[in-house]
Image: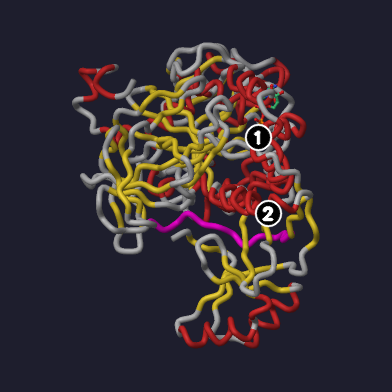
C-alpha cells in the first residue's frame, strides 16, 4: 500500500517522513465532521462510496452493548485512525471523539497530531465544543486550517463569521478562498491566492479570472445580490490578512476555506491545502532529550488503547505514533516502562474499511499494535534507547466513585478488570494507602456508563456505584522527599496510589483541597500528570 509499490517513480525522490500529514478534525457535533471525513477518504480512494464511515459506525454499533451507548446517544466514543494517500502524501486522520465527556481521550489524540482542521457550521459560527477543542490545540500550538461548512444552506454573513472566530479564539484568519454566493445562490469559490474560480460540482482545478470584476464571476451570481456580493469579494481581496506560512505553523494564523462537505465542494481545496502547507511530522520531547523525526532509530509513544475493535478476537490495540526512524514488522522494541524488549509481529495500519499489516511505518504514522495488556497509554517504545516521551497527559478526575459489586466472591476478578480498563484509559483507579477499597475516577460522567457496560459485557461483572467520601484529587509531589513523606504520613487517610503508584491526595471538598494547598506551600498539587 505504501511507498514504492504505488508511485515508484515519485517516492524514490521524496523522503517518507516529509510525505506524512498527521491531523485531526475538530468541530461541534453536527457541524459536518463525519461527512467531511467521508469526502476526504473518497479523495484518497480509501473508500468507494460516501456514507461508508457512518454505515460502518452503525454496523459496528450493533456488535456489542458497549457500542450501543454510542448508537443510543448518537455520539462517537471511539477514537480511530484512518490512513489514505493523495497527491504524493500519506494522510493519517485521527478521529477525535465527539462528546465533551471524553476530553481526556481527545487531549491524548491531539497529542499525536501535527495539525487540525476546524470545521465550523456557517449558520452557527463558533460553538462550545469547537471552542474547547481549539483551546486544547492552542496549548500545543497546533496549526489549524478552518473549513467553514454548509455554505449551501442559509448562512451568516462571511465577515461577521470571520470576526466572531477571530475575536472568540484570538486567532488571525486568512481566507484563501471566498464564497461566490451562499445558501441557495452558493455557486462556487474564488481562490484569493491564485485568482481562479471553481464552480459548484466542478472537479477541475479552477478557471483563471482577471479579478472580482471579471464577468465570469458576476455571471455566477443572482441578479438581486450581484452588486453586494462582488463588493464583498473585493473587500475580502483588499481587506483580509494574507496567508502567512510562518504564522500558520506557529499556530496563530489560520487559513480559511469555504465549502459544503455534503455537496463535496471545497474538499479538494482543503486536501490540496493540507498537502501544500500542513506541517510534516514534528519531533517529541522526552525525559532525556528532544527526539527528531529524521533520526534513524525507531521510537514512538502509545496515546490510545482500544479494546473490542473486532469482537471475534477480543483484541486490544495500542495506537502508537511513530516519532522517529522506521518501524519494520518483526522488529523488537524496548518498552521503557519495564525495560523489556517486545517483538512487533503484527503492527497494523487502519483504513476506512480495513486494516492491513504494516510492513514498515515512519515518523508521523500511527500503527495499531495488538497486545494482551503489555502496553499502556503513555508507554514509550524505542529501538533500544532508554527514554520516556513526555506530552501524553492524564487529568485529575472530576468525579470519584466507589465501585460496588453485586457478587462479593468476584472481588479479585473486579480488581483485575478495573486495572485493565485503567490501563486502557477508560477510568482511573486509585488505591487508598489505608487499605480501604479502590476508587474509580473519571473526567466525564459518560465514562461511568461505559465502565458499567464493559464490566458487564466483557467481564460478566454487574457493578453499581456508591458515592465516595472524596470529591477532588490531585497528584502530589515535592522537591524534598522528606517533606512529601511527612505530608503523606499526616494525611494517610486521604492518600491513594494511581496505576503507576504515584501518590494522590484526595480531598472531601474543593475547599479542603485549597486549604491543604495553602498550608503546604512546599507540596505541588497537580491536576495534570504526564504519563511516565
Ligand atoms: P458531525 O456530527 O460533525 O459528524 O456531523 P455530520 O457529518 O454527521 O453532519 C451532520 C448533519 O449535517 C448531517 O445531516 C449531514 O448530512 C449534514 N451536513 C453535513 N455537511 C453539510 C453541508 O455541507 N451542507 C448541508 N446542507 N448539510 C450538511
Mark in front: 1 vs 2: 2
Q: Residues within 10 Å of mark 2 (few under 14, many from 20)?
A: some
Q: Left of 434 or right of it: where is 347?
A: left
Q: Quick one: 428 or 134, which is closer to the camera? A: 428
Depth check: give the residue in front, 136 or 452.
452
Residue 393 is covered by the magenta coloring: yes
Work out whether residue 380 or residue 141 is closer to the camera in this orientation and state it: 380
Q: Which residues lie in the magenta part?
A: 389-401
Q: Are marks 1 and 2 in contact (CB under 8 Å)?
A: no
| Residue 352, disc | none
Residue at 79% over, 49% down: 406
Q: Tell which quarter ligand 1 is in.
A: top right
As drawn, which residue projects farthest toward the front?
409
Q: Is residue 488 above or below residue 242?
A: below
Place residue 184 in its image quadrant: top right
Secondary structure under the numbered disc 2 in the rendered image: helix
Query: The N terminus appears in which quarter of the rendering?
Result: top left
Tell me what residue is drawn at x 72 percent, y 61 percent: 400
Write down the quadrant of residue 68 in the picture. top right
**Coordinates of residue 260 in the picture (x, y in percent):** 61, 23
Question: Could you say where residue 248 lies in the image, as x and y percent from the top left?
Answer: 44, 46
Q: Secondary structure at mark 1?
A: loop
- Give the spatial CA distance, label 1 vs label 2: 31 Å
Q: Position of residue 75 (x, y in %)?
A: 70, 34
Q: Is residue 122 above or below residue 54?
A: below
Residue 245: quadrant of the picture: top left
Residue 411 got which mark?
A: 2
Q: Nearer the viewer, residue 370 or 36?
A: 370
Q: Which residue position holds label 1?
A: 76
Is the C-beta of the residue carrying label 1 under 8 Å from the nearest atom of ligand 1?
yes
| Circle nearer the N terminus (1, 2) | 1
Q: Is residue 167 visible?
A: no
Amino acid at each position: 500500500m505504501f511507498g514504492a509499490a504505488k508511485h515508484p517513480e515519485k517516492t524514490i525522490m521524496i523522503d517518507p517522513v516529509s510525505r506524512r500529514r498527521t491531523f485531526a478534525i475538530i468541530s461541534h457535533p453536527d457541524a459536518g465532521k463525519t461527512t467531511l471525513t467521508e469526502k476526504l477518504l473518497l479523495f484518497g480512494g480509501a473508500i468507494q462510496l460516501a456514507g461508508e464511515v457512518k454505515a460502518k459506525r452503525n454496523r459496528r454499533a450493533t456488535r456489542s452493548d458497549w457500542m450501543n451507548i454510542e448508537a443510543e446517544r448518537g455520539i462517537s466514543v471511539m477514537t480511530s485512525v484512518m490512513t489514505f494517500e493523495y497527491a504524493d502524501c500519506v494522510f493519517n486522520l485521527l478521529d477525535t471523539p465527539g462528546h465533551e465527556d471524553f476530553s481526556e481521550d481527545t487531549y491524548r489524540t491531539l497529542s499525536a497530531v501535527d495539525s487540525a482542521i476546524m470545521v465550523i457550521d456557517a449558520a452557527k459560527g463558533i460553538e462550545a465544543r469547537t471552542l474547547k477543542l481549539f483551546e486544547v490545540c492552542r496549548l500545543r500550538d497546533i496549526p489549524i486550517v478552518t473549513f467553514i461548512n454548509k455554505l449551501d444552506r442559509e448562512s451568516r454573513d462571511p465577515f461577521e463569521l470571520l470576526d466572531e472566530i477571530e475575536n472568540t479564539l484570538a486567532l488571525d484568519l486568512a481566507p484563501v478562498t471566498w464564497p461566490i454566493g451562499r445558501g441557495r445562490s452558493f455557486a462556487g469559490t474564488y481562490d484569493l491566492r491564485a485568482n481562479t474560480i471553481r464552480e459548484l460540482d466542478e472537479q477541475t482545478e479552477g478557471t483563471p479570472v482577471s479579478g472580482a470584476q471579471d464577468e465570469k464571476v458576476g455571471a455566477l451570481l443572482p441578479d438581486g445580490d450581484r452588486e453586494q456580493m462582488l463588493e464583498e469579494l473585493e473587500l475580502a481581496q483588499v481587506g483580509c490578512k494574507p496567508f502567512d506560512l510562518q504564522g500558520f505553523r506557529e499556530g496563530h494564523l489560520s487559513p480559511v476555506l469555504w465549502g459544503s462537505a455534503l455537496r463535496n465542494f471545497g474538499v479538494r481545496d482543503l486536501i490540496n491545502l493540507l498537502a501544500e502547507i500542513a506541517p510534516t511530522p514534528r519531533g517529541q520531547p522526552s525525559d532525556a532529550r528532544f527526539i527528531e523525526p529524521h533520526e534513524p532509530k525507531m521510537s514512538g509513544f502509545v496515546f490510545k488503547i482500544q479494546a473490542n475493535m473486532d469482537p471475534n478476537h477480543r483484541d486490544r490495540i495500542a495506537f502508537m505514533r511513530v516519532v522517529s526512524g522506521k518501524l519494520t514488522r518483526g522488529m523488537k522494541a524496548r518498552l521503557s516502562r519495564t525495560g523489556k524488549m517486545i517483538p512487533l509481529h503484527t503492527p497494523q495500519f487502519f483504513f476506512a474499511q480495513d486494516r492491513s499489516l504494516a510492513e514498515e511505518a515512519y515518523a508521523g504514522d500511527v500503527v495499531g499494535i495488538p497486545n494482551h495488556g503489555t502496553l499502556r497509554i503513555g508507554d514509550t517504545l524505542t529501538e533500544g534507547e532508554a527514554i520516556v516521551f513526555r506530552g501524553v497527559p492524564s487529568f485529575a478526575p472530576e468525579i470519584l466513585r466507589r465501585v460496588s459489586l453485586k457478587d462479593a466472591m468476584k472481588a479479585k476478578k473486579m480488581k483485575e478488570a478495573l486495572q485493565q480498563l485503567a490501563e486502557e484509559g477508560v477510568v482511573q483507579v486509585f488505591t487508598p494507602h489505608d487499605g480501604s477499597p479502590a476508587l474509580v475516577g473519571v473526567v466525564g460522567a459518560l465514562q461511568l456508563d461505559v465502565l458499567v457496560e464493559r464490566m458487564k459485557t466483557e467481564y460478566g461483572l454487574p457493578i453499581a456505584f456508591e458515592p465516595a467520601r472524596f470529591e477532588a484529587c490531585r497528584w502530589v509531589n515535592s522537591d524534598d522527599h522528606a517533606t512529601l513523606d511527612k505530608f503523606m504520613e499526616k494525611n494517610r487517610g486521604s492518600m491513594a496510589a494511581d496505576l503507576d503508584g504515584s501518590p494522590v491526595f484526595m480531598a472531601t471538598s474543593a475547599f479542603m483541597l485549597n486549604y491543604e494547598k495553602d498550608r503546604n506551600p512546599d507540596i505541588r498539587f497537580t491536576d495534570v500528570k504526564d504519563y511516565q
